[in-house]
Image: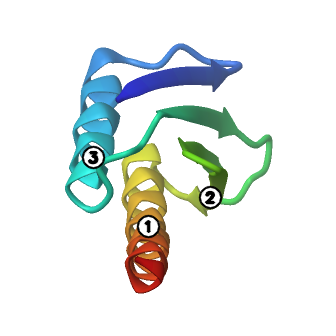
Amino acid sequence: MKVNLQSVNFNVDQKLLDFTQAKLDKLENHFSRIIHADVFFKVMNTSSKENKITEILLSVPGDEFIIKKINKSFEGGVDECVGSLERQLQKRKDKLNAHV
C-alpha cells in the first residue's frame, strides 16, 4: 500500500515514519484491497498536553475512511486511528461478504 505522510509546521523523524508505515501495513491483514493512505501530522498551538493531531485518510475501492484523533503523542494517535480503521474495515468486509 502506498502511504503519503505530511507534517504541518515541523519535520517528522524517520522513527515515526517507520512506526506509521508498520501500523498501516497491518491493516492489509483485515482488508486486502486498500489503495493508499494519506497521513497528516499537525501540532496545535495550545497549552494542553494533548496537542498533536493525527489524521488518516484511507482509500478503498468505492469508499474513503477519514479518522482524526488528538493525543499527547503521534504514536498514540496513530494507534487510535489504526484501531478505528480496523473496526471500520471489518464492518465493510462483513457487509461485502453478506452480499456475495
Label 3, on which residue? 23
**Residue appearing at x 57%, y 42% in the figure:** 59
The amino acid type found where label 1 is placed reads Leu
Res 15 → quadrant: top left
Label 2, on which residue? 67
Left or right for 65, reference 4 = right
Earlier sequence position, callout 2 versus callout 1: 2
For marks 3 and 1, give the one nearer the viewer. Answer: 1
Outermost residue, front direction? 100
Can residue 50 be seen at all in this image of the molecule?
no
Can residue 39 be seen at all in this image of the molecule?
yes
The amino acid type found where label 2 is placed reads Ile
The residue carrying pointer 1 sits among few (fewer than 14), some (14 to 19) or many (20 or more) residues within 10 Å by Cα, namely: many
Separation of disc 2 and disc 1 at Cα? 12 Å
Provide residue 94's location: percent of width, then percent of height.
39, 81
- Camera-side residue of 1 and 13: 1
The residue carrying pointer 2 sits among few (fewer than 14), some (14 to 19) or many (20 or more) residues within 10 Å by Cα, namely: some
